[in-house]
Amino acid sequence: MHYVSAEGLSKSYGVVPLFNNISFHINEGDKIALIARNGVGKSTLLKILNGNETPDEGKLFINKDVTVALFEQEPMFDESKTVLENIFHINHPVLNVIREYELASDNEDGEKLAELFIKMDELNAWNFEVKVKQILNKLNIHHLQHTVSSLSGGQRKRVALAKTLIDIGFEHKHTLLMMDEPTNHLDVEMIEWLENYLNQENITLLLVTHDRYFLDAVTEEIWELERSNMYVYKGDYENYIEKKAARIESEQASIDKAKNEYRKELEWMRKQPKARTTKSKARQDNFYTIETKAKQKIEDAQIQLQVKMSRLGGKIIEMKKVCKSYGEHIILKGFDYTFSKGERIGIIGKNGVGKSTFLNILQHIEPADSGKINIGDTVIFGNFSQQGLVIKENIRVIEYVKTFAENFPLANGGSLSAAQFLELFLFTPEKQYTYLSALSGGEKKRLQLLTILFRNPNFLILDEPTNDLDLPTLTVLENFLSEYQGCVLIVSHDRYFMDRLVDHLFIFEGSGIVTDFPGNYTQYRLQEKEDDRKKITDSNKTEVNNTVTNTASTIPAKKISFKEKREFELLEKEIPTLEAEKQQIEQQLSNTEINYEQITLLSKRIAEVNSQLELKEMRWLELSELM
């Protein structure tokens, strides 16, 4: 099914074109990543498709049967209403009863729950309620009666994501889901769950993301906005890098050829008399076409990081028996570590376990409860915090940078003025006189990075540095950090970024437990999965042994709840239905007359059915033991 067609779309702000005369198509089942440098128009294009913005020129067709859903970087809420009211904002009987059910469940109102069970049955709302519960649990959304205005930035982002996923799961069969940086403020387990969710659901997706592992896991095609044009690449991120390099090389060769031809034609033009024949007039017209092409420039501008690093002495930082807690919430419990020169350490753990607190304690921004932290005399911290730019007043970019210094030393011994240094970070002279409030999220992050690096730090602390940075800037930052001679401490949920840069990990497991893992993030996850597999195997063996040992014993059974009983009854109906569908698909696949497209669709469906059967049968076994 055809979802979207765009022909000759153009959009500018003032004299600066974001994109010009671009055309594209989106069909059902497409999963597309949209990438570009900050400020080039990614978010604007999504808003045009959503109807929040209008193009200056061009035609846009969206199928009348398609619902367009946009998950934005800055989600909008009714601030006075609760989390529950914002998530279930659509007035529909099924969503209304699920909202009431979740509220009664939160309040442990047994009488109300019994009444709502009957309504849930009547509206056949149980299957959707299971999906809602999964989304809320996986995104760690529990305090449904809190008002949205009381939430932190990360909590707001997760609530907005839950709202979007619940909407598209309920509202419409044909949905184009557009997501602008959905992985910001999600921990790694949430990101991996979202990957699986988007792959399992039959969703048509247009995605803006800087997370390259997420991009590869979820999308099959990459669109790039560059120099007002759109370029399309099939395949993964690595293929995009290769194909883009080949395209730029080809374009450069074409420009070089035009330059050679231009020189010859220019010489002919100078020799020509004023009176021209028809033949010479055609050649003159062709000359101007060649001139335009020869004077093209392929602007592959990149941030240039060549900042001088202050000398780092032999003594870096020693942490001895450091403890920190907030009431019963323990962050560190007797933490010991001595940092070495040039170390690259990644820090991972679930949200709320104390990663940012640890960074603050290390820098003496926040005091420890006990223990010692000895910092070497030569250590100069560069702190890239999640807080972002601290702005006391609304000033222009150049004025803000000059509050730190007028000139900045470089690694080669030279120095640059504030304006020149800004240009290295892709702030054009016009952009330098823009007010800070008018900068995009990515541009503010880039400016924050600039203000940190020109202080010549030798111990960099990066707390979620990849949020809101575009992929070209991230690549340059990675290249800079891989050559950086100082110490680097990174908190990030960007697995690609971590894998490329860190030597080992601090795993914050909660309750003050911090484990030092000798490897990068991917190696840690492989080890973790292997450990989980062993635990399951050992647990199964223990269960078998306990069953044999306790056969003669009387073990008091756990009382099954009304909800579990209801779930058991539903499973007894669903499992035979899925088995019947599986048999029907197998019969269809055995038919030699079906075409390739039907085979593909049936093969995909039978895989989904088998997966559902496996999960439901396992759950049926668990509940049958309780019964």
Image (cartoon, grey):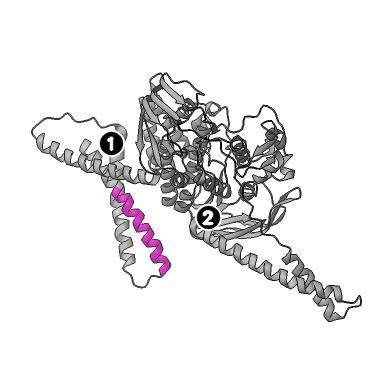
Q: Residue type at mark 2?
A: Ile
Q: Secondary structure at mark 2?
A: strand
Q: Which residues are magenta?
A: 596-614
Name the mark nearer the viewer: 2 or 1: 2
Residue marked by disc 1: 565
The image shows residue 381 at horizontal and vertical percentages of 53, 31
Q: Is residue 116 above or below residue 301?
A: above
The image shows residue 185 at horizontal and vertical percentages of 50, 37
**Which one is nearer the viewer's eye here, 369 or 382?**
382
Marks 1 and 2: in contact by CB < 8 Å?
no
Q: Residue type at mark 1?
A: Lys
Mark 2 to mark 1 CA distance (whole Å) = 42 Å
Q: Is residue 461 above or below residue 278?
A: above
Please tell me which residue is depicted at 37% across the width and 34% down the height of the picture.
117
Question: Can you name the residue that lies furthest to the left here?
Answer: 552
Please tell me which residue is depicted at 41% across the width and 30% down the height of the picture.
353
Q: Main secondary structure of the magenta part?
A: helix
Q: Residues within 10 Å of mark 1 (few under 14, many from 20)?
A: some
Residue 597 falls inside the magenta stretch: yes
Residue 498 falls inside the magenta stretch: no
Of callouts 2 and 1, the N-terminal one? 2
The image shows residue 164 at horizontal and vertical percentages of 51, 42
**Which one is nearer the viewer's eye here, 90 or 469?**
469
Please tell me which residue is depicted at 58% across the width and 31% down the height of the picture.
78
Residue 380 placement: quadrant? top right
The image shows residue 550 at horizontal and vertical percentages of 11, 34
Residue marked by disc 2: 32
Residue 123 visible at all: no
